């Protein structure tokens, strides 16, 4: 993996769907080997921002650099991505092994990898998310939380510099959330991967978070969990928890902007 | 290439026309589900049917102008496949646009064929005439099936990656648009060369039903893919044999044989709840 000063750098980015401005002059950077959470109320532009970072859509203005690949063609292995509410249809017979191995397929035309290499990569990725025992199971036999972890293993199997997860634990039970947290920690610490996590539910990962960005069409907050806590917002589940606060800022955009 | 006329087997394949039909049905029985697996996964199970309607327009035009129907049908269907891919990608409500193309196809077929002197031939292309195919038809089916099979096998990993998660595949640099167009062109070619076997109105069934049957009893993509081809050959050859024995139309009998296999496997799956059993075994293992 190449050494970079920033894993993701977004500069003055704007994006509109027709006359509806979804992202307004967004700027932030994320350091390598960190876990950053991107939060915001519904319709705040989180998924649009992620789609701009991954290159699925082009911003109208501004730039995105991932692992300092500025002005160069994106390396196919730079970004691993798990889409919001990505569901593999239950009538599609596909095994856990096949789903994870598909993450090794890139545009570099090396489509027929040695089986031993592919197998070792898949086994390692599944071990990282605690699902090695399910390698030959069908996807449809797994729970929602297990399926999400398989998709994370798929996004992670090619050793990307940056892993982007869009609402990966929405609707997942508490035990699966804890396993998800352990998997993220392993990926960051053992593989030097930067993780950008889009989620409303941060209580499961609050102790391993390095950075939080609050978005509502523009950046309302960019700092550490401690800095957010200093402003009276805790990630824990109590009266001032994050989801309630996000609901509040949905009606009040005058929250003190802090781009630090 | 072998002289098929010299080959004869036991009843019901005891004549040269049945041997030719057997070879063509086997080739399509393998090739159609091989491609159909990816078509079904894209939720485009009826696309072969639609392209059949467009190919029918090609046959109608060819009969009117006294040209070779297969050639005109191939050209028109490949163009339609590219247009349809564009519609699916860029049109917000592709359903209506596709319906317009498909109905125009079958209407053009009837209208143009009626203007020429060979209008009686239209029916054999719509419903198939497997028992009257000649050696050149068989060679064409074999060559096209082989080429399509090689293309799909070479692209299989990419097609599977797109089927599982198209956005991630795109981010990883996979040329998803190009791969989708290649798949659609393969579908168009199968439809065009199969018109004399099952007929344009039924080819989609050979592409789709074996895939649906295989999905009933498999739990991995690889096993489902291979089984769909085994079922494809079994249904096609079994249907052909049955058509000879009971003296029925081969195209329709082949499709009914595939439907029969689907019903049998559905019943088997109900009697032996494989999925529940496997889930129980998995949970015990953990």
Image: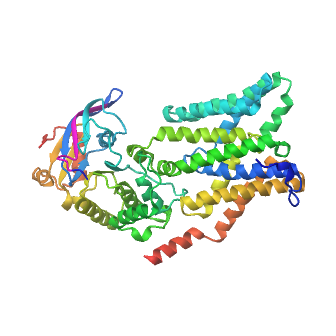
Q: In which quadrant of the rendered view does residue A124 lie?
A: bottom left
Residue A181, given in percent of the width and then of the height, sits at: 27, 63
Asked whether residue A237 is in view, the answer is no
Report the residue that reaches farthest toward the left.
A230
Residue B128, given in percent of the width and then of the height, sits at: 80, 42
| Residue at image point 84% right, 54% down | B7
Asked whether residue B256 is in view, the answer is yes
Q: Is residue B91 left or right of residue A248?
A: right
Q: In which quadrant of the rendered view does residue A46 lie?
A: top left
Q: Above or below — where is B251 with respect to B53?
A: below
Magenta-colored span: A3-15
Residue A34, given in percent of the width and then of the height, sits at: 20, 54
Q: Is residue A22 left or right of residue B247?
A: left
| Residue at image point 66% right, 49% down | B31
Q: How many marks?
A: 0
| Residue at image point 73% right, 26% down | B108
């Amino acid at each position: 993996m190449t050494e970079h000063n920033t894993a993701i750098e977004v500069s003055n980015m704007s994006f509109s769907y027709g006359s509806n401005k979804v992202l307004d002059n967004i700027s932030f950077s994320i350091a390598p080997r960190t876990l950053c959470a991107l939060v915001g109320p519904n319709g705040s532009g989180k998924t649009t921002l992620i789609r701009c970072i991954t290159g699925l859509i082009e911003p109208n203005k501004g730039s995105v650099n991932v692992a300092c690949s500025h002005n160069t063609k994106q390396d196919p292995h730079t970004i691993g991505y798990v889409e919001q509410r990505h569901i593999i249809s239950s009538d599609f017979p596909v095994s856990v092994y096949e789903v994870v191995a598909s993450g090794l397929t890139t545009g570099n035309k090396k489509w027929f990898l040695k089986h031993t290499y592919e197998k070792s990569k898949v086994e390692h990725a599944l071990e990282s998310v605690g699902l090695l025992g399910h390698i030959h199971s069908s996807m449809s036999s797994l729970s929602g939380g297990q399926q999400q972890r398989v998709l994370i293993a798929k996004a992670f199997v090619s050793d990307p510099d940056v892993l982007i997860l869009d609402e990966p634990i929405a609707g997942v039970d508490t035990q699966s959330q804890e396993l998800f947290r352990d998997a993220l920690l392993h990926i960051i610490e053992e593989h030097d991967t930067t993780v950008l996590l889009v989620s409303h539910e941060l209580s499961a990962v609050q102790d391993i978070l390095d950075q939080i960005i609050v978005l509502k069409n523009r950046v309302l907050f960019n700092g550490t969990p401690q800095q957010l806590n200093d402003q009276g917002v805790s990630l824990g589940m109590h009266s001032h928890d994050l989801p309630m606060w996000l609901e509040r800022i949905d009606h009040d955009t005058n929250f003190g902007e802090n781009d630090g | 290439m072998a002289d098929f006329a010299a080959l004869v087997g036991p009843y019901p394949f005891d004549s040269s026309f049945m041997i030719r039909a057997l070879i063509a049905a086997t080739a399509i029985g393998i090739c159609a589900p091989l491609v159909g697996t990816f078509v079904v996964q894209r939720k485009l199970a009826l696309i072969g049917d639609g392209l059949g309607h467009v190919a029918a327009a090609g046959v109608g035009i060819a009969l009117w102008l006294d040209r070779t129907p297969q050639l005109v049908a191939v050209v028109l269907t490949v163009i339609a496949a590219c247009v349809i891919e564009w519609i699916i990608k860029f049109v917000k409500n592709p359903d209506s646009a596709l319906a317009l193309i498909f109905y125009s196809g079958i209407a053009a077929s009837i209208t143009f064929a009626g203007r020429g002197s060979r209008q009686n031939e239209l029916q054999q292309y719509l419903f198939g005439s497997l028992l009257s195919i000649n050696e050149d038809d068989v060679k064409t089916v074999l060559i096209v099936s082989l080429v399509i099979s090689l293309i799909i096998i070479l692209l299989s990993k990419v097609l599977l990656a797109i089927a599982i998660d198209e956005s991630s595949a795109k981010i990883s640099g996979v040329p998803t648009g190009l791969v989708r167009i290649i798949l659609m062109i393969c579908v168009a070619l199968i439809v065009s060369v199969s018109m004399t076997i099952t007929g344009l109105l039924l080819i989609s069934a050979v592409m789709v039903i074996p895939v649906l049957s295989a999905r009933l009893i498999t739990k991995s993509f690889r096993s489902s893919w291979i089984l769909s081809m085994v079922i494809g050959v079994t249904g096609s050859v079994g249907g052909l044999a049955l058509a000879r024995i009971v003296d029925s139309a081969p195209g329709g009998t082949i499709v009914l044989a595939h439907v029969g296999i689907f019903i049998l496997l559905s019943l088997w799956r109900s009697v032996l709840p494989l999925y529940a059993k496997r889930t129980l075994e998995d949970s015990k293992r953990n």
